[in-house]
Image (cartoon, rainbow, N blue to C red):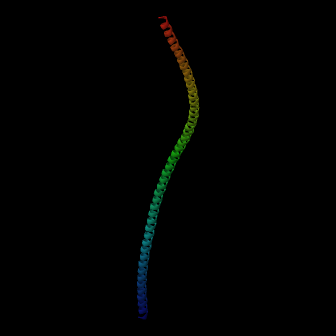
Amino acid sequence: KAAAAVHTAWAEHDVVEETCLHVEMDRLCARATKAEAELSAERWHRAKEQEDAAAEMLDRDATIQRLQKAQESRAAAYNLELMKQKTIETELTAEVKELRKNRDHWKAVAENSKVKVGEVQAELAMAKQRAEEALVQRRDEAKAMVDELEAKLAAADEEIVKLKKDLRMRK
């Protein structure tokens, strides 16, 4: 009986041990399942974080590209404006050169005109002087003629008086 009791005790011990092992195994399986679930959740969270980080990087890349395009567009607009300003500056420089050339030309024309006016005024003064001298000469000649005619008239008057006397005497 003792052997049977030992055997039964060993059997019960084995059952208890086996039950403990099953419980331990179930507990370990539950822990493993929980750990796998946590690991899976952690992996999912990491994957989600990586996906979010990748999406954020893509957004950053897209933003950077938009900013680069905007910067390139502004640079192109700036360069275009700079070219326009250089073109205007070149045109204005050409206009200034042309205006200076015209100014110099008209300045020379004005100087030539002043010289010609001076020459004409000198000629006019000389002509005026010659005209005044000619006028004085003609006046003097006319005066001499008047004096001569007056003298002839006086001589003619004397002649008339003489002739009248002669005629009276003859009558």
In the image, what residue occupies the spot 43% across and 86% down?
17
Place of residue 93 in the rendered image (x, y in percent of width and height, measured from the top left): 54, 44
Residue 88, above or below 28 = above
Mark count: 0
In the image, what residue occupies the spot 58% across and 26% down?
133
Place of residue 19 in the rendered image (x, y in percent of width and height, measured from the top left): 40, 84
**Which of 108/121 is in front?**
121
Residue 104, above or below 25 = above
Task: Name the quadrant of the N terminus.
Answer: bottom left
**Which of 47/10 is in front?**
47
Place of residue 157 in the rendered image (x, y in percent of width and height, measured from the top left): 51, 14
In the image, what residue occupies the spot 44% across and 68% down?
49
Residue 62, image quadrant: bottom left
Residue occupying the far bottom of the picture: 2
**Which of 12/132 is in front?**
132
In the image, what residue occupies the spot 57% across and 31% down?
125
34 left or right, relative to 162: left
**Which of 57/96 is in front?**
96
Residue 45, above or below 4 = above
Place of residue 81 in the rendered image (x, y in percent of width and height, measured from the top left): 49, 49
Residue occupying the far top of the picture: 170
126 left or right, relative to 37: right
